[in-house]
C-alpha cells in the first residue's frame, strides 16, 4: 500500500511535464552500509547494514533528472573511550534529486554517472546498549547530504551504486572522558535495483 501511494503521488506530480520528455517510473529496493564519522581520533566507527525501499521517477534522455523517495535504515557502530561498542540506529525518509549523464545509451544497456543532493527526514531513532555516555545524545531531524555514483540500465531494470556524504552534523554526544561535545555526520554506500514499471 505504501509503495502504491508513493508511485501514484510521484506520477501525479510529473503529469504536467511527461509529455515533453522521456520518463520512467517504478519501485526501488536495495542494501546500504551506513556509518557516522567524526573528526575526533579517539572515536572509532564501523558500518551497520540495512535496507531501503521506495520509488523513483526519471525524466530526460542523455541528460536526466531522477527524483526519488526512499525509506532507509541507517546508523553506526561506535567505540568511545570506554572501549565499549554502542549501536546507533535511525530510519529516515530520503529524498534525493539525482542528475544523471548517460555514458552508454544503447537500447538494452546503458551506463550513467549520477550526482545530486539528498534531504533525509528522521522518522525513528535509537541507541542500543546505551549507558550514561549516550543517554543525552541529540539528533538533527532534518539531514542533508550529497550522493554520487554510477547507474546501469539493463532491459527494464536500473541498478545504482552510490556513495553518500553527510553535509550537516546529525548527532551530538557528550563524551565525559573527553570532557566535550562531539558531532557526527552520515556516511554510507548503497546498492539499489529499480524496476521500470511505466515509461515512454
Image (tube, rainbow, N blue to C red):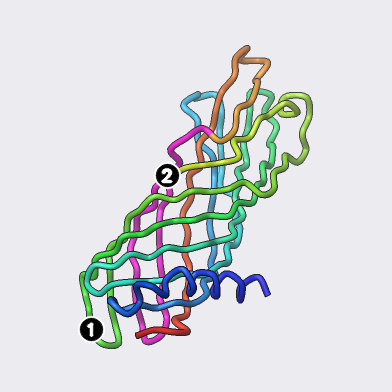
Q: Count of labels shown?
A: 2
Q: Quadrant of the N terminus?
A: bottom right
Residue segment shown in magenta: 145-169
Where residue 135 sits in the image (x, y, percent)? 75, 28
What residue does disc 1 label?
106
Q: Which SS does the magenta portion mostly show?
A: strand
Q: Is residue 100 left or right of residue 192?
A: left
Q: Picture quarter containing residue 104?
A: bottom left
Query: Does the residue at mark 2 contact the one at mark 1 (Cβ under 8 Å)?
Result: no
Instruction: Looking at the picture, tell me which residue is in the foreground, 16 or 186.
Output: 16
Q: Is residue 20 left or right of residue 173?
A: left
Where residue 80 sits in the image (x, y, percent)? 63, 27
Q: Is residue 80 left or right of residue 154?
A: right
User: Is residue 159 one of those drawn in magenta?
Assistant: yes
Where residue 11 sits in the image (x, y, percent)? 48, 74
Instruction: Looking at the picture, tell me which residue is in the foreground, 193 or 35.
Output: 193
User: Is residue 199 one of those drawn in magenta?
Assistant: no
**C-alpha span from label 2 to label 1:** 31 Å
Outermost residue toward the top? 179
Label ID, residue 97: none
Q: Quadrant of the C terminus?
A: bottom left
Label 2 packing within 10 angstroms: few (<14), some (14-19), many (20+): some
Residue at image x 69%, y 37%? 86
Residue at image x 63%, y 12%? 179
Q: Earlier in the sequence, mark 2 or mark 1?
A: 1
Residue at image x 36%, y 59%? 98
Instruction: Looking at the picture, tell me which residue is in the foreground, 41 or 157.
Output: 157
Q: Picture quarter containing residue 15?
A: bottom left
What residue does disc 2 label?
165
Amino acid at each position: 500500500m505504501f509503495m502504491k501511494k508513493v508511485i501514484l503521488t510521484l506520477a501525479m506530480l510529473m503529469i504536467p511535464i511527461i509529455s515533453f520528455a522521456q520518463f520512467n517510473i517504478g519501485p526501488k529496493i536495495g542494501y546500504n552500509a551506513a556509518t557516522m564519522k567524526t573528526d575526533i581520533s579517539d572515536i572509532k566507527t564501523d558500518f551497520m547494514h540495512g535496507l531501503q525501499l521506495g520509488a523513483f521517477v526519471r525524466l530526460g534522455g542523455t541528460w536526466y533528472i531522477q527524483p526519488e523517495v526512499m525509506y532507509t535504515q541507517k546508523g553506526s557502530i561506535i567505540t568511545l573511550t570506554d572501549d565499549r561498542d554502542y549501536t546507533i540506529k535511525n530510519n529516515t525518509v530520503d529524498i534525493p534529486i539525482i542528475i544523471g549523464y548517460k555514458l552508454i545509451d544503447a537500447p538494452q544497456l546503458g551506463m550513467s554517472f549520477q550526482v545530486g543532493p539528498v534531504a533525509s527526514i528522521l522518522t525513528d531513532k535509537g541507541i542500543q546498549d546505551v549507558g550514561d555516555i549516550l543517554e543525552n545524545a541529540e539528533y538533527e531531524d532534518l539531514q542533508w547530504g550529497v550522493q554520487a555514483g554510477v547507474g546501469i540500465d539493463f532491459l527494464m531494470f536500473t541498478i545504482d551504486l552510490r556513495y553518500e556524504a553527510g553535509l550537516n552534523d546529525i548527532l551530538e554526544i557528550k563524551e565525559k572522558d573527553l570532557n566535550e561535545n562531539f558531532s557526527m555526520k552520515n556516511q554510507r554506500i548503497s546498492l539499489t535495483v529499480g524496476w521500470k514499471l511505466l515509461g515512454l
